C-alpha cells in the first residue's frame, strides 16, 4: 500500500546539482512554514549539513560510494519511505538501477534535474519516473541565465549557476516552491500537525517556538532553550534542529522523553551499553588528550535500523576528562550517547558541528565549560581522515 503523504523523487544524472538544488528547495519550504523531511536515498553521505559546511570539511566527512547499492540499504530506505509521517523530498542519486525500483515505488511525484548534453541519461530517467506525477523537468547549466519556459502541464525551464553553499533564487525555483507548497500544505503546515502529534500523551514541546522553521540555530541559544524545559517533566520534542540541540535536551532532562522522527513518528533514545565489542553497523574509535576524549561514530550503511535485538555497544572512556562526539548519526543515537556518558559521570560533553568546525558543549557540570561553549578540535586528531 502506498503512503498517501506526498513523496517527491528528485532525480537526474550525476553532477547536475541535485543535492544543492534539494537543499535550496527545502530551505525555501521551511521559510514558508511548510514542514517536510529530506531523505537521502543514496549511500554517499551527502545531506543538508554538507551544503552548510566548509567544502574541505564536507569532503572529508562525505563517504563516496561506488558500485552496487547494498541490498539492506535499499530495504531500509524503502521502509522509511513507506512509513513516512511528513511529506518527503527524496534524493535518489545519479545512477539508479533496476534494483532501486523498490524505492521508486514508494514515491508519488517526481522532479527531474537533467543535463542537455546527456540525452541518454534523460531518456533513462524518464523511464524511471514513469507512473509518477511529474511536477517539473528542468535542465541544469553551469553558466547562463535561468529561464522559466512553462508552468503547465509541468514546470519546465533551465536553472543555471547551481553552486554549493548558495541558495537558488530565480523564477524557476520560485514557481516550483509555490507548486510544492500547495501540494504539501494540507499535510505539513507548522500550525496544523494532526499526524505528527498523534500518540503523544505528554506535553509536546515545539522547537520552532525557540527558532522558527527555516531560521538558523546558534550555540548561544541553548541556555534559553533549556529554561523552557523542566528537567523533571516528560516531553515529546517536535521540530527540526541540529543534533547538538537534541543532545543538549538529552543532557538536561531527567525523565524519559520522545523525539519526533518523520520516518517512525515518536522514538526514544536507543539503548546503548559500554563494551569493547563493535556493532556490525556502528564503528567507533577514540582519541584523547589531557582535556578530552574524541569519540568518532561512523555508520557505513547510513540507514541503521532503530529497533535492535540488544543494546548497541559503545566504548568506555575516562571520567577524568570531557568527551566530544563526532559523526553523522541519527538524533535518537546522539541523545542516547549523551544520556549514557552523563550517567557515567563524564564532566562535560560536546557534539562536533561541521558548519562551525568546532564542537558545541551540550552538557557540563564543571566551571571550565558552559552550555553552548565552542571547543576547538586539536589538529593532530586529524578528524575524519581515518575514514575510507
Image (cartoon, rainbow, N blue to C red):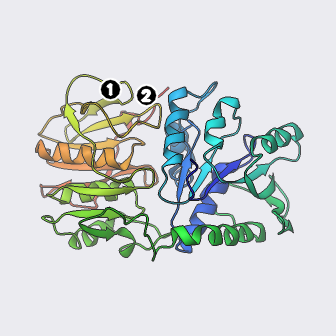
Picture layout, residue 384 above or below residue 199: above
Which of the labelled discs sits on residue 311, or is there none? none
> At x 17% / y 69%, what residue is drawn?
230
Q: Where is mark 2, residue-wise?
A: 386
Count of marks placed on residues? 2
Residue 337, by quadrant, is: top left
Q: Where is mark 1, residue-wise?
A: 279
Q: In this rendered view, identify the residue nearer to me: 241 or 222.
A: 241
Regarding mark 1 in the picture, which secondary structure is present there? Answer: loop
Q: Residues within 10 Å of mark 2 (few under 14, many from 20)?
A: few
Among numbered discs 1 and 2, the one appearing first in the sequence: 1
> Does residue 226 appear to the left or right of 10 in the view shown?
left
> At x 41% / y 66%, what residue is drawn?
217
Q: CA distance from mark 1 to mark 2?
A: 18 Å
Q: Position of residue 142 (x, y in %)?
A: 80, 52
Q: Position of residue 341 (x, y in %)?
A: 18, 43
Circle 1/circle 2 CB separation < 8 Å:
no
Amino acid at each position: 500500500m502506498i503512503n498517501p503523504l506526498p513523496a517527491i523523487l528528485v532525480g537526474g544524472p550525476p553532477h547536475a546539482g541535485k543535492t544543492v538544488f534539494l537543499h535550496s528547495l527545502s530551505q525555501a519550504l521551511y521559510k514558508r512554514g511548510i514542514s517536510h523531511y529530506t531523505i537521502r536515498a543514496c549511500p554517499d553521505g551527502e545531506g543538508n549539513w554538507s551544503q552548510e559546511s566548509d567544502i574541505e570539511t564536507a569532503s572529508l566527512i562525505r563517504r563516496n560510494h561506488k558500485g552496487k547499492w547494498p541490498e539492506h540499504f535499499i530495504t531500509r530506505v524503502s521502509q522509511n519511505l513507506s512509513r513516512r509521517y511528513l511529506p518527503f523530498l527524496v534524493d535518489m542519486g545519479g545512477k539508479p538501477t533496476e534494483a532501486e525500483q523498490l524505492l521508486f515505488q514508494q514515491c508519488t511525484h517526481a522532479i527531474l534535474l537533467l543535463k542537455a548534453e546527456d540525452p541518454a541519461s534523460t531518456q533513462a530517467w524518464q523511464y524511471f519516473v514513469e507512473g509518477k506525477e511529474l511536477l517539473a523537468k528542468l535542465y541544469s547549466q553551469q553558466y547562463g541565465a535561468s529561464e522559466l519556459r512553462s508552468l503547465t502541464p509541468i514546470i519546465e525551464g533551465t536553472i543555471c549557476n547551481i553552486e554549493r553553499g548558495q541558495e537558488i533564487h530565480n523564477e524557476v525555483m520560485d514557481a516550483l516552491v509555490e507548486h510544492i507548497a500547495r501540494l504539501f500544505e494540507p499535510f505539513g503546515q507548522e500550525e496544523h500537525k494532526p499526524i505528527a502529534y498523534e500518540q503523544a500523551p505528554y506535553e509536546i514541546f515545539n522547537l520552532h517556538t525557540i527558532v522558527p522553521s527555516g531560521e538558523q540555530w546558534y550555540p548561544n541559544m541553548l541556555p534559553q532553550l533549556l529554561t523552557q524545559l523542566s528537567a523533571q517533566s516528560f516531553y515529546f520534542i517536535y521540530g527540526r534542529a541540529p543534533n547538538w540541540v537534541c543532545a543538549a535536551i538529552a543532557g538536561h532532562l531527567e525523565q524519559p522523553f520522545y523525539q519526533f522522527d518523520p520516518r517512525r513518528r515518536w522514538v526514544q533514545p536507543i539503548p546503548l551499553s559500554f563494551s569493547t565489542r563493535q556493532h556490525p553497523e556502528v564503528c567507533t574509535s577514540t582519541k584523547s588528550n589531557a582535556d578530552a576524549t574524541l569519540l568518532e561514530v561512523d555508520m557505513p550503511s547510513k540507514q541503521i535500523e532503530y529497533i535492535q535485538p540488544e543494546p548497541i555497544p559503545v566504548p568506555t572512556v575516562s571520567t577524568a576528562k570531557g568527551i566530544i562526539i563526532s559523526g553523522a548519526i541519527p538524533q535518537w543515537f546522539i541523545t542516547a550517547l549523551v544520556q549514557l556518558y552523563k550517567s557515567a559521570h563524564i564532566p562535560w560533553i560536546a557534539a562536533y558541528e561541521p558548519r562551525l568546525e568546532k564542537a558545541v558543549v551540550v552538557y557540563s557540570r564543571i566551571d571550565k565549560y558552559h552550555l553552548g561553549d565552542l571547543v576547538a578540535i586539536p589538529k593532530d586528531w586529524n578528524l575524519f581522515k581515518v575514514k575510507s
